[in-house]
Amino acid sequence: MRAVAIIGIGQTKVDEHWDKSLRELTGEAVLAAVQDSGIDQIEALYVGNMMSGSANHQQQLGAYIADWVGLRYAEAAKIESACSSGAAAFRAALLAISSGAIESAVAVGVEKMTDSPGPEITADLATAADADWEQDQGVSFVALNALIMRRYMYEYGWQKNDFAPFSMNAHANAVHNPFARFRKAITEKQYLEAGMVADPINLMDASAIGDGSAAVVMVPLDKLNMDSPIPIIKVIGSAGATDSIAIHDRKDPLWLKAAEISSKKAYSQAGIGPQDIDVFELHDAFSIMAALSLEASGFAERGKGPTLGLNGSILPSGKIPIATRGGLKARGHPVGATGLYQLVEIVEQLRGTAIGTQVENARIGMAQNIGGSGSNIYTHILERVNR
Amino acid sequence: MRAVAIIGIGQTKVDEHWDKSLRELTGEAVLAAVQDSGIDQIEALYVGNMMSGSANHQQQLGAYIADWVGLRYAEAAKIESACSSGAAAFRAALLAISSGAIESAVAVGVEKMTDSPGPEITADLATAADADWEQDQGVSFVALNALIMRRYMYEYGWQKNDFAPFSMNAHANAVHNPFARFRKAITEKQYLEAGMVADPINLMDASAIGDGSAAVVMVPLDKLNMDSPIPIIKVIGSAGATDSIAIHDRKDPLWLKAAEISSKKAYSQAGIGPQDIDVFELHDAFSIMAALSLEASGFAERGKGPTLGLNGSILPSGKIPIATRGGLKARGHPVGATGLYQLVEIVEQLRGTAIGTQVENARIGMAQNIGGSGSNIYTHILERVNR
C-alpha cells in the first residue's frame, strides 16, 4: 500500500451557526485545510455526514461541497456511518490515494444540527440505533448509553463521581481551544449537580450537538520532501470494524468489540502497541464511552477505565492524554464532523501547535471514532515522520 | 493499481416489497451474490443508498447490513451520491481492494421507497436537487428533467415521438428479465398517450421508483485462476466526476459534463474508445437522460442522441445496445440500488446469461450511473478476460 500523509488541516468553531448555510460552514473548513496544505490542486473530496438529508434537506454533499469550494468536476461522495462518518470519510480518502487512483484528496466532516427543532434532531439521531429493535421501543440515543452506564456501574462497582474526571479534563482542555464550543472548566461539584438527562447520564456526561466542520488534505507520502521543515504527518494505522447496532444483541454490551478489532489492526499495521501512543483522541460522546474506549483499545483492563481518570493519566501531562482539545464533551459533537475534528487535533498535537494543552514530545497519536453505540468504529494512528 | 474482478452477482426483483424489511431485502441480494461467488469469506461491505435515514428511519446501513448477512465485525460503510450511490459504493469497494487494504468485498445498493407516502418520497427525492436554488423554488425532480427535455427539443428540433424508442426498447427488454418491475412491451401509441407528469415528460418517459437491491462480490484479479471455466469479469475502467447540482448554474444544461469526464477517464484507463463497447447500461431515469448520456459518452454527436433510438442502434441487436434488461424505465429505479443493478446486468451480458436479450459476443460492457440531474456521474467498464 502506498503511504499517505496529512499536509493540511482546517476547522470551524463548533457552535450554533445560524448565520452560515451548510455549504458555507463546510467550505470554511475545506478552504482552511487547503490553504494550510499549500497545494493548489485537489483531485477528490470525501464528505463525512450523517443527517443532512433530513436536517438540511440536502443530499449528495459530495457534489454540493465540491462545487462550492471550487472543485466542480472533481470526484466526490458522501460517506455515512452515523457518528463515525467523519473517520469513514477519512478512510475512504486514504484508500483512494493508497490505491493510486488519485493523487490528492480532502476529507471533510460536517453536521449542521441546530437549525432543526430539538425533537426532530433527537429523532434524527435515533436513526443511528436499530429502527426495529431499539427505536420502536421508544428509546433515545442518550437512554441507550444510560442503560450501558448503569450496567457498567453495577458490574464493576463504580460510583457516579468516579466518572467526573472525564468531563472535568475535557472542559479544562477546551478552555485553550478556540474552536471548542464550551470553553470553561467545571468542578466536580458542577459535574455532580448537573441536570439529569437519562439516569445516570447527566448534562456533564453528555456531549452537546452543534454545527461544525473539520477537514484534512491528504497526499501520497512519496510526493513530499522529507527534509522539509514543515511537519509531515503520516498515517501509520487505519482500520474500521462493525458490531451489531442493537446493544442487547451483543454478547457483552460492556465491551466495544469493534474498538478492540480496529485498534488491534491499526497497532499491527503501525508495528506498535498502546504503550507507544502519546495522545489519544477518543469518542467521549458520553463519559461511559470514554471508559469503554480506553479499555477496548488496550489502555486499561476491563472494568478499570475510570481509574485512568481518577489517577490523572488522561490529563495532557498524563500517561495517555485524551480529549486534549475538549473532546466531544466540550469541543462539541457535530456528528458527521467529529471524526475529522479528532484527526485535526491529533495533527495539531504532532505538529506541536496544541497551544495550552500540548502533549510534550508527542510523536504518535491515535484517533478513535465511534458510530452508534459502538456499532461502527474506526481507529487511526498518525506519526510525525520528519523530526 | 491492483486489478479487481467481479466474481458474484445477486439481485432482487424491483417491486413493492411490503412483506420484506430493509435488511431482508438487502440481505437477499447480498447472500445471492456471495453464493454466486463461491467464496465464503468477505472482508468488507459497502452499501449504496440515498434515503434510508428518512424513508426507513435507519442510518448506518454499513453495520446494519453487515450484521444481518453474517458479517458482524467486518468493515462496512454507506456511500451516498443521490441516484449514483450504487456506483459510488462499487467504486469505494474497488479502491479498497485496489489499495491492498482488503482482499474481498461486497458492494450492495438498496432503496426501499414504497413504504413511504408519495409526497414524502417526492420530497426525499428532491433532496438530490439544490436545497437553496432549486427545491426552494418548488421544483420537483421530474420538473427539473422536464425543463431540460423541453429545452433540448427546442434547441435541436426533436418531437415528442422521437423519444419513444428509448421507452419501447426498455420495456421490450424487461419482458425477459425476471427481476424487472414492468415486464410488458409498449407501443408507440401507448408511449404517446401516457399520462403527463411534467410536460413534456409523461409516465412512459419517467422511470418508476420501487424497492430493490443488487450486489456484487469483488476480489483481486490475481487471486483467480485464469484457466477457470467460470467467467472472470475484470474492472478495466472506473471514474467519477461531479458538476454543479443546480442546473441553471451550468454553462450548458444540455451537456452532461460529468459523464464526459468520467467516461473519458474510464476509456483511457481501459485503453479503448466508445466504438469498443459492446453493451451500455445507461441511466435512463428519464428519456432525455438516455439521449444526453449517449452524447456525453461519445456514442452520438451533440443533439443527436435520439437518432440512435430511431435507427435501432440501441436494440440488443444494434450497434450500442442500452437498457438491455429494462433499464431504469422498466427494470425500475430503486435509487441507491440502480448503479449496482446496472453492473449486475453488464456482468450477465459478459457471462452470456442475459436470456432473451443477450448481446451477441459481448466482451466489454459499460455502466453509467447518474446522481442528481447530472451532478455526480460514475462510469465503469468491465471486460470478460478468460475467454
Image (cartoon, coloured by chain):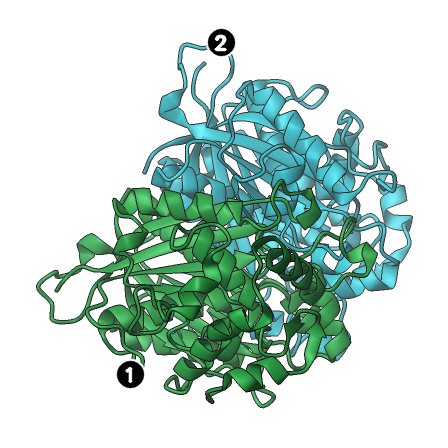
Chain colours: A cyan, B green
Depicted A298 relative to depicted B85: above or below = above
Q: Residue furthest left?
A: B227
Whether pointer 1 and pointer 2 mark residues with C-beta atoms closer than 8 Å, the reply is no
Q: Quadrant of the N terminus of chain A?
A: top left
Residue B190 on image: x %, y %: 56, 86
Image quadrant in which the C terminus of chain A is located: top left
Name the image quarter holding residue A362: top right
Q: Amino acid at mark 2?
A: Pro
Residue matched to label 1: B355
Looking at the image, residue A165 lies above or below residue A382: below
For the view shown, which residue lies furthest in the front direction?
B157
Disc 1 from disc 2: Cα separation: 63 Å
Q: Which mark is residue A229?
A: 2
Check chain identity for marks 1 and 2: say if they share one.
no
Comparing A63 with B203, the one in front is: B203
The residue sitting at 37% across, 38% down in the picture is: A98
Residue B52 circle label:
none
Asked if residue B65 lies left or right of residue B176, the reply is right
Numbered disc 2: secondary structure: loop
Q: Chain of mark 2?
A: A
Residue at (37% x, 32% y) in the render:
A3
The crowding category of the residue bearing disc 2, from other C-alpha atoms within 10 Å (few below 14, some 14 to 19, many at least 20), is: few
- Residue B145 in view, yes or no: yes
Is B243 in front, or is B251?
B251
What element does badge 1 sit on?
loop
